[in-house]
Amino acid sequence: MEGKGTEKAPQVVYREPSIPSPSESSHSFDLECEYNDPKLPPVDGGLHAWLFLAACFVVEGTVWGFASCFGVFQNYYRNDPAFQGSHAIAAIGTCAMGMAYLLSPIVIATLITFPRAQRWASSVAFVVLSLSLALSSFSKNVTHLILSQGIAYGTAGCFAYAPSILFMPDWFVQKKSLAFGIVWSGSGLTGIIFPLILQTLLDAYGWQSTLRICSVAIFLLAAPFMLFHKPRTPRKTATPLQQKLDLSFHRSRTYLIYQAGNIVQSLGFFLPQIFLPSYAALLGAKGLQASSTITVFNISNMFGCIAIGWLADRYHVSVCIFISTVGAVVSTFLLWGFSVHLAPLYLFSILYGCTGGSFSSSWSATSSEVARSHPSTDVSMVFAFLETGRGIGNVISGPMSEALLKTRLWEGRAFGAYGTEYGILVVLTGVTGLLGGVSVVAKAFRWI
């Protein structure tokens, strides 16, 4: 018996040095204590958790909802004498969305390094965001709008939204993906409401007054919820960046495969939202009929985000990505591709909104998968880089789609949408949706 005991001892000694600092055992113990601490609000439910989720929902809806509605401003700017003839108007919306996406890793890293700043980041950011819209109303040219309504808004929006990513694992553990899905649905709701409000304001008061009204309205809408946009556990003092962040997960095969699928899927993700009204108009739709394709998409996207999030809490993330991929591919190639009437186009908006449009609801589970394969990983940083991957698709897809439209590859030589100038965009959306599911294949072959 003694001999067996001496044989086991070296195993314990051998394992201890392999544990990263902070050790997994002590870190897990701390998390368990925080999870069960009766002095703290409960996790995965209770009044405080749902109020926090409501605050995240409002932040998502205001920051991303307003930015995604730039098309309403774009149409107005193009007809305004002060900006008529400018080819840089589209860059305003690209900068607003692009900065909010692409800056995510830098903003998250900054807030992780200075934990005490996390609590007030959103409040300060909403002040800056509102000021950027107010200042943009005094713009004399498109460059001023790019700097204010574009870059300044996008940067402030990123700081406003980042704490949601950092605080969510505090409040939701077993229901984290569902919680993120509910949050994502916020931009779907405002994507329905904001365009109608903005168009009404622009028609009645012009772009300058509309920007000033939006500046005040966004601040007043967000301000009460900042009381609840806070962490569940107190934040500690700042520590050196190298002790807080480990970016070595970028060498992880699991991360690289998931991120590759995310970036490729993002290249086609924005195309239906940009071109569906134009294609509907080509089929004979007018005014509200054409724009309602996006309304239907946003409504479906709300339910799709929640559903995919719910599934991600119960099944492996590859199952959710598989559902998203199949729905995107089938709806794009069969419904949009062969649509010659409005009915199948509306069906496409519903199915694609529920599936392909809800791809981002898998990010939380994806981040956890990467952390499991690479234990020293901070899931918030993985999430931030997935946001950046979506941003790359956002920035590239606009110019790329405009260039592809000029090719008119199969115009007059194929059926349905394939035989129009939008045919190449239908194929691009379907192919990128298919390749976005590369992680499903990787899981099947046990590469991840």
Image (spheres, rainbow, N blue to C red):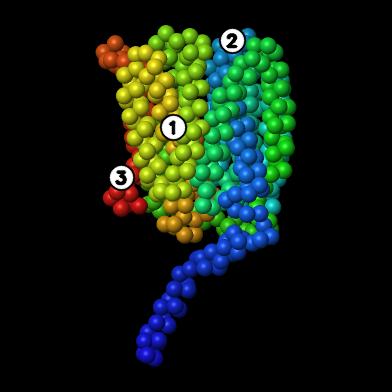
Amino acid found under the numbered disc labelled 1: Cys
* Depicted 42 relative to depicted 99: above or below: below
Contact between marks 3 and 1 (CB within 8 A): the answer is no
Quadrant of the rendering where the N terminus is positioned: bottom left
Helix, strand or loop for disc 1: helix
How many angstroms separate mark 3 from mark 1 (CA)? Answer: 22 Å
Q: At which x and y percent is residue 375?
A: 47, 59
Q: CA distance from mark 2 to mark 1?
A: 35 Å
Residue kind at label 2, given as amino acid type: Asn
Disc 2 crowd rating (10 Å Cα; few below 14, some 14-19, many 20+) is few
Residue 146 screen position, x and y as percent: 61, 25
Q: Nearer the viewer, mark 2 or mark 3?
A: 3
* Residue named by callout 1: 354
Residue linked to disc 3 = 441
| Residue pictured at 54% horizontal, 34% vertical | 185
The residue depicted at 36 percent of the width and 36 percent of the height is 325
Give me the disc on residue 264.
none
Residue placed at 48% from the left, 31% from the top?
301
Residue lying at the far bottom in this picture: please name it: 2
The crowding category of the residue bearing disc 3, from other C-alpha atoms within 10 Å (few below 14, some 14 to 19, many at least 20), is some
Q: Are marks 2 and 3 in contact (CB under 8 Å)?
A: no
Q: CA distance from mark 2 to mark 3?
A: 48 Å
Which residue position is annotated with label 2?
79
Amino acid on which disc 3 is placed = Val
Q: Which image quadrant is residue 134 in?
A: top right
Q: Examine the rendered structure and indicate whether residue 418 appears above or below residue 159.
A: above
Q: Position of residue 149 (x, y in %)?
A: 63, 26
